[in-house]
Amino acid sequence: MSRNVHVVPNEKGWAVKKEKSQRASRVVKTQGEAIEIGKNYAKEQSSELIIHGKDGKIRDTNSYGNDPFPPKG
């Protein structure tokens, strides 16, 4: 079962958390660094990367799994 990966703000910077986990997998200083780490986790698990903004709201998502609507062309 693949779990989505979230990039969320943290008091020490940005956290990379796997869905339903209590603790962050990694905490880093920049959102960019957290996104790269999260992207690797999501690719390994064939899951979704969900990027949150500073306000905690979802800013962007990227699918690295079985996309039901793959792009054509």
Image (spheres, rainbow, N blue to C red):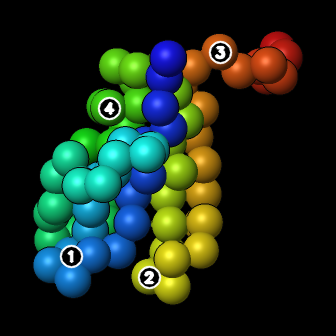
Circle 4 — which element?
helix
Mark 1 vs 4, N-terminal side: 1
The CA distance from mark 1 to mark 3 is 31 Å
Q: Does residue 66 appear anywhere in the picture?
A: yes
State yes or no: discs 4 and 2 in contact (Cβ < 8 Å): no
Between 48 and 72, which is closer to the camera in this rendering? 48
- 56 up-or-down from 14: above or below: below
The amino acid type, in three-letter code, at marker 4 is Tyr
State yes or no: discs 3 and 2 in contact (Cβ < 8 Å): no
Q: Residue at x 51, y 27 (%)?
A: 47
Q: Residue at x 79, y 19 (%)?
A: 68
State yes or no: discs 3 and 4 in contact (Cβ < 8 Å): no
The CA distance from mark 3 to mark 2 is 29 Å
The amino acid type, in three-letter code, at marker 3 is Asn
Mark 4 vs 2, N-terminal side: 4
Residue 37, position as x, y percentages in the image: 25, 43
Q: Does residue 34 appear anywhere in the picture?
A: no
Q: Which residue is mark 1?
A: 13
Which class describes the residues within 10 Å of circle 3: few (<14), some (14-19), or many (20+)? Answer: few
Q: Which residue is mark 4?
A: 41
Mark 1 vs 3, N-terminal side: 1
Circle 3 — which element?
loop
Q: Which residue is mark 2?
A: 54
Residue 5, position as x, y percentages in the image: 43, 43
Which class describes the residues within 10 Å of circle 2: few (<14), some (14-19), or many (20+)? Answer: few
Q: Which residue is mark 3?
A: 66
Between 30 and 72, which is closer to the camera in this rendering? 30
Residue 65 quadrant? top right
Which class describes the residues within 10 Å of circle 1: few (<14), some (14-19), or many (20+)? Answer: some
